[in-house]
Image (spheres, rainbow, N blue to C red):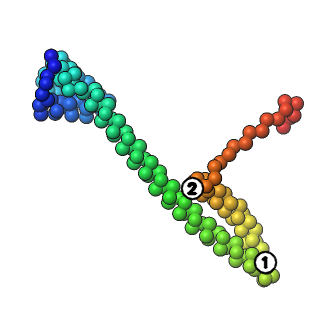
Amino acid sequence: MKIKRETPLHIEAFEYYYNLGDKRSYERTAEHFGVTKTTIQNWAESFKWQQRVEIRDSKINKELLKDGEKKALEKRAELIADIDAALIIFRDALQKNLKKISEKTLIPEDITQTKQYVDIANALEKIAKLRLLLTGEIEQKVITISLPEDIDI
């Protein structure tokens, strides 16, 4: 029997049913409201509970996805800012030692530091590439090489 007008009791029953989540059932809803399962089935059919559940779940999932994307973009922006700060520090340190090399004022201690700066420069290159990947300025490419079967590695 289809009911034409949804009352506050019907709305409350639907909300209870919806909020059961994974444990959602007509039986539980009927028990909670002191009615039969058939009554709940009738309400659900009359007021399209299944369709409403799907619509509400879809809206919630879209909102969660938007929030997740927003947080990911914020994290990415923070990471890019950190990388930019590191690039400035490394660049300045390298320029300082390169200036000493060109002026020939490098001392043995500077040479040790210069070797460390080479390591830093290599790390800097990786960080710079990471920044370019994060900003979408370059794409990472994977190269696959096939060797003839008669070559042993």
Q: Position of residue 145 (x, y in %)?
A: 77, 38
- Using the image, determine if residue 103 lies above or below residue 71: below
Question: Is 111 situated left or right of 4 in this image?
Answer: right
| Count of all numbered marks drawn on residues in the image | 2
Badge 2 crowding class, 10 Å Cα cut-off, few under 14, some 14 to 19, many 20 or more, is: few
- Using the image, determine if residue 83 lies above or below residue 51: below
Nearest the viewer among 53 and 101 is 53
| Residue at the extreme front of the image, as rendered | 4
- The structure residue drawn at horizontal position 45% and vertical position 48%, both measured from the top left corner, is 69
Q: Amino acid at mark 1?
A: Ile
Question: Is 128 situated left or right of 4 in this image?
Answer: right
The Cα atoms of the two marked residues, 2 and 1, are separated by 34 Å
Upstream in sequence: badge 2 or badge 1: 1
Query: Which label sits on residue 135?
Result: 2
Q: Amino acid at mark 2?
A: Thr
Say which of marks 2 and 1 sits in front: 2
The answer to whether one can see residue 123 in this image is no
- The structure residue drawn at horizontal position 30% and vertical position 36%, both measured from the top left corner, is 56
Report the residue marked by disc 1.
101
Question: Is 6 situated left or right of 81 in this image?
Answer: left
